[in-house]
Image: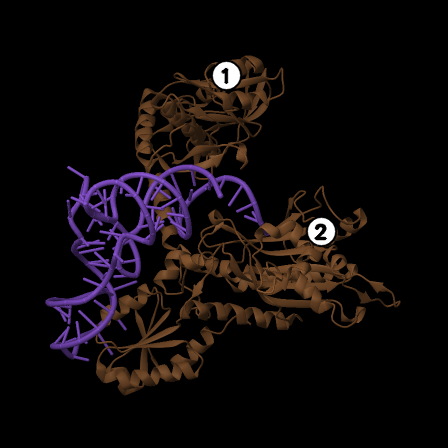
Chain colours: A brown, B purple
RNA sequence: GCUGCCGUAGCUCAGUCGGUAGAGCGUACCCUUGGUAAGGGUAAGGUCGAAGGUUCGAUUCCUUUCGGCAGCACCA
């Protein structure tokens, strides 16, 4: 007797074990036809799996969401591998999982695949779908499987299987002439994949993800249950491309990059206005939260980096310089050692703590060329960095205060959704277990106190202390890690930072390294993509454009612009001899939030026609009132 | 850094199976003064990423190099 509980809570009883397919048939023929797989107590399995004992079972169909898509994409990977083996028999297969939005498969083949090959493979995949080959599971003895794959010349597969403990039976899946090691589950046949898939791109990938290993050829694809979903996914990719900060940076004349300064940014006027808007907002926040802003040197003798430990741990990322008089300097990659130097000036008392030292610190790091990406990953960047020198007892309150500040800042920039990752003690670490206990619990509790959920990142802390990493989610659902808070017991020791305690003894402060935006470059890149360049008024590089319908209104338009500028607004004037349609279109495309159009009527009445980005109508308002409204709307968050 | 692809006018791209290049948009000038997402005309713009090689001749073929893109690795 097997009792099967279905998702709706109903229970079906069978005299003997029953396969997923038979269960589906028992429920209804329509369901049996649509069935792709099952989950038994939440675990996805093949449709053919025989349910031996009482369980909660649900039948997966194309409508089952993520789990069903996962099945489909995993199959797509297998079918791609089958197609590749048919077309290029010399290829060795390795692994091919489903991933977000698609799948990939890593192949080992002496000749590289070309983009043209993708079309060929895609066509062959469609044939395999049409063949509707049954996909069957087989259980093998491990050693036999190793020998089998070695016999086929599939050394990677053999290696994977050999890594599975001896004696364990392993599962292979067979479809047509293709057989692959796989945990499963899979669809019942290749026909179920359908045709809503597309091979997307070719890339290299290291065998087992290790850069010391040989590089395999990875083919990425996407797969969906129907053409509509595929199309909307492809459309979404196009839209994402349109908001690419590199493209918008050029189109909106915010910045540019060029090869003579790879990994650095040339900020144009408009981009720099945006930067300054962000910077002055941050500066106000720092002032309101009792930070003291400092500025420290770019070039620092290498001995300081030896003392701090950077020479040891970070030298590969540091730009170094030998001067004409043979001194060895480094361009600073971080601000912390310099901040300790300021802390060390004069004698600090416990009364000075917590001492919050902030810097918009310009840092340079040698990043591998392949890591560079627009302004998101650069070699020269400015951090909104700060170090809080405090006592161990102050870690909690400082962390709470920081979490609150960070949340407020993200909110103000339009990111209400913040996740926190907590990285606890790594195997290799400095400091006693008691200290770690204290630091870890302080961080977690503080994040909670600030209303933030933490997610554990086990063993990922820095060697000198645990850390919190703050991840924001943007308008199209992408996650960006920006903020960080790290507890550091080590650097104060290494660089001999000390304060005089209440009892007159000399003590080490704890340092909290913290950043909210991370780097200005990256954060501004995120802002650009998040808003698609349609910035809120307080950030918009050009807030208002005043433009004319006829040249008779030119003088009045100048007056309007002057009034806006006098009120502190970033207003431009467009008196070109072009039709209003043309000018409206151009400024709309340029994503100017507010357009003030003036013609004869407005000039006579001292009014303006306000047209807002995205809107299709306009509002006629008296000039004074328009200025007052815009001033109020453009105020940065308090 | 690794693998693959790419580098032609300010931008987007076409082209040359080896005989020094073309479009649209943009820019300049002229005409047009037009009420809310592209008015018309004319013109200027490129030693085809750089260096070397093959060749009578290279933007086109080869090598090297720099940069970009995608992914991996790195970083966080």
Seen as rendered, the residue at the extreme right is A503
- A341 up-or-down from A433: above or below: below
Q: Residues within 10 Å of mark 1 (few under 14, many from 20)?
A: some
Viewer-closest of A490 and A26? A490
Left or right: where does residue A114 sit relative to residue A374?
Answer: left
* Badge 1 element: helix
Left or right: where does residue A145 sit relative to residue A252?
Answer: right
Of tags 2 and 1, the one toward the viewer is: 1
Residue A496 in sight in this render? yes
Viewer-closest of A612 and A98? A98
Give the residue at x 67% y 55%. A486
- Answer yes or no: are tags 2 and 1 on the same subunit: yes
Q: Position of residue A47 (x, y in %)?
A: 47, 22
Chain letter for the residue marked with disc 1 in the picture: A
Viewer-closest of B54 and A3? B54
Chain letter for the residue marked with disc 2 in the picture: A
- A7 up-or-down from A509: above or below: above
Residue A201 in sight in this render? no
Q: Position of residue A635 (x, y in %)?
A: 49, 74
Give the residue at x 39% y 81%. A564
For residue A465, the mark is: 2
* Badge 2 element: loop
Q: Position of residue A338 (x, y in %)?
A: 66, 64
- A545 up-or-down from A336: above or below: below
For residue A529, the mark is: none
For residue A150, the mark is: 1
The image quarter in which residue A409 lies: bottom right
**First in sequence: mark 2 vs mark 1:** 1
- Quadrant for the N terminus of chain A, please: top right
- Quadrant for the C terminus of chain A, please: bottom right
Q: Position of residue A451 (x, y in %)?
A: 64, 56
């Amino acid at each position: 007797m097997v009792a099967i509980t279905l998702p709706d809570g109903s229970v079906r009883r069978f005299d003997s074990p029953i396969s997923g397919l038979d269960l589906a048939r028992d429920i209804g023929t329509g369901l049996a036809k649509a069935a792709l797989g099952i989950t038994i107590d939440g675990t996805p399995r093949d449709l053919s799996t025989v349910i031996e004992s009482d369980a909660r079972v649900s039948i997966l169909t194309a409508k089952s969401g993520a789990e069903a898509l996962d099945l489909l994409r995993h199959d797509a990977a297998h079918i791609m591998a089958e197609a590749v083996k048919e077309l290029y028999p010399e290829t060795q297969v390795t692994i091919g999982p489903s991933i977000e939005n698609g799948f990939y498969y890593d192949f080992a083949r002496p000749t590289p695949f070309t983009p043209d090959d993708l079309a060929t493979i895609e066509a062959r995949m469609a044939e395999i779908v049409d063949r509707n080959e049954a996909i069957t599971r087989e259980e093998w003895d491990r050693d036999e499987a190793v020998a089998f794959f070695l016999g086929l010349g599939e050394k990677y597969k053999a290696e994977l299987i050999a890594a599975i403990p001896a004696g364990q039976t392993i599962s292979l899946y067979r479809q047509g002439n293709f057989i692959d090691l796989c945990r499963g589950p899979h669809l019942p046949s290749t026909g179920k994949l359908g045709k809503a898939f597309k091979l997307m791109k070719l890339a290299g990938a290291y065998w087992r993800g290790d850069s010391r290993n040989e590089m395999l050829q990875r083919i990425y694809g996407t797969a969906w249950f129907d053409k509509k979903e595929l199309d909307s996914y492809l459309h979404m990719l196009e839209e994402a491309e349109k908001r690419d900060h590199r493209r918008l940076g050029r189109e909106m004349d915010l910045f540019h990059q060029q090869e003579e300064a790879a990994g650095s940014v040339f900020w144009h006027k408009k981009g720099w206005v945006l930067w300054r808007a962000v910077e002055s907002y941050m500066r106000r926040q720092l002032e309101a939260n009792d930070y003291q802003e400092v500025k420290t040197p770019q070039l620092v003798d290498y001995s300081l980096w030896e003392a701090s430990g950077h020479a040891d741990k970070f030298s590969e990322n540091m730009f170094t310089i030998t001067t004409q008089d043979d001194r060895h300097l480094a361009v600073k990659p971080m601000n912390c050692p310099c901040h300790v130097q300021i802390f060390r000036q004069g004698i600090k008392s416990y009364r000075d703590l917590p001492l919050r030292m902030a810097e918009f610190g310009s840092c340079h790091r040698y990043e591998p060329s392949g890591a560079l990406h627009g302004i998101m990953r650069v070699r020269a960047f400015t951090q909104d960095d700060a170090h809080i020198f405090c006592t161990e007892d102050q870690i909690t309150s400082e962390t709470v205060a920081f979490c609150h500040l960070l949340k407020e800042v993200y909110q103000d920039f339009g990111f209400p959704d913040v996740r926190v990752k907590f990285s606890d003690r790594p195997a290799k670490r400095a400091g006693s277990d008691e200290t770690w206990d204290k630091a870890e619990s302080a961080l977690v509790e503080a994040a909670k106190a600030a209303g933030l959920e933490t997610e554990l990142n086990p063993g990922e802390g820095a060697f000198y202390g645990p850390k919190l990493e703050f991840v924001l989610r943007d308008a199209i659902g992408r996650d960006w890690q920006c903020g960080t808070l790290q507890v550091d017991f080590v650097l104060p020791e290494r660089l001999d930072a000390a304060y005089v305690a209440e009892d007159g003894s000399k003590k080490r402060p704890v340092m909290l390294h913290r950043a909210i935006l991370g780097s200005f470059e990256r954060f501004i890149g995120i802002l650009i993509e998040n808003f698609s360049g349609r910035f809120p008024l307080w950030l918009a590089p050009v807030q208002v454009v005043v433009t004319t319908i006829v040249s008779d209104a030119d003088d009045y338009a100048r007056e309007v612009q002057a009034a806006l500028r006098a009120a502190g607004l970033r207003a431009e004037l467009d008196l070109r001899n072009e039709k209003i349609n043309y000018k409206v279109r151009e400024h709309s495309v340029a994503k100017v939030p507010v357009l003030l159009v003036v013609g004869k009527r407005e000039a006579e009445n001292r009014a303006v026609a306000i047209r807002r980005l995205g809107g299709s109508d306009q509002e006629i308002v008296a000039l004074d009132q328009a200025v007052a409204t815009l001033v109020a709307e453009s105020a940065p968050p308090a």
